[in-house]
Image: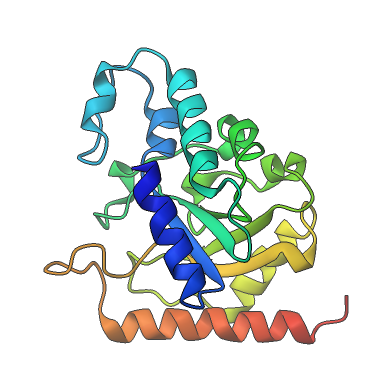
Amino acid sequence: MVAVLREELIALRDAGADFVQFDEPVLSEVAFAGPHATHSFMCAALSEKASPESELEFAVELINQVVEGIDGIRTGLHVCRGNWSRDESVLLAGPYDALVPYFARMKVTQLVLEYATERAGSFAPLAVLPEDKEIGLGLVNPRTSEVEPVEQLVARVHELLRYRPAESIFLNPDCGFGTFSDRPINTLDVAQKKLESLSLAAQTLRAQPT
């Protein structure tokens, strides 16, 4: 798998891509669900694992093997909390504290994290990450019909600015809007409006004095 991902990363760089995001749907489940828990469909095999720490160490090793020595492109790691249901109670909850020590050693440019709901906890754990680590900040919830107001998104970014520099923050939806091609969790119209809100929030923030 490492060899395949390295080949794809190099091919995308050589084709002109500036940024490649790897999707990681397992790390949060390892950290928040614990060993021998009832896992989601993404992580059923983890029920047999006894040590979350060993799994997370293995993840750091594999991710670093994928990106080692490949320059000329920025990379990101999206850490998913679940995107298959509109029922927030069945999705993973927990602050990023347990994952931050592992994030700090991953040789990716950006950590793409889901912060659109209260399930993610506060921004405080991100303060100890290396200074050069970018944050892809999940701000809109792809599972709801409500379009987040621009003012709300701007306020959330100001909260993060207490812990991370402005140039390291990138605005994103929490996850994708079309997890399943035959059963999307939102409409195209709502997805477009949420992305427009994100874009306007970014424009507002850039126009503000630093």
Task: In this rendered view, identify the residue nearer to me: 12 or 165.
Answer: 12
State how the image is colored: rainbow
Residue 86 located left or right of residue 125: left
Q: Is residue 174 visible?
A: no
74 or 190: which is nearer to us?
Answer: 74
The image quadrant that residue 12 belongs to is bottom left
Q: Quadrant of the N terminus?
A: top left
- Res 125 → quadrant: top right
Is residue 157 depicted above or below 44 in this figure?
Answer: below
What x and y, as percent, mark residue 200?
59, 86
Q: Residue drawn 67% across and 86% down?
A: 203
x and y percentages locating residue 75 in the rendered image: 56, 59
* In front of the other: 158 or 53: 53
Q: Residue furthest right?
A: 210
Quadrant where the C terminus sits is bottom right
Is residue 42 placed above or below 8 in the rendered structure?
above
Please name whichever residue, 75 or 77, is drawn nearer the observer in this view of the structure: 75
Residue at figure coordinates x 60%, y 71% from the top left: 153
Q: Position of residue 13 (x, y in %)?
A: 51, 69
Can you say whether 140 is above or below 132 in the image?
below
For image coordinates 41% across by 49% down, the residue present is 80
Q: Residue furthest top?
A: 50
Picture coordinates of residue 83, whole percent (x, y): 31, 55
Residue 87 in the figure: left or right of residue 65: left
Number of numbered discs present?
0
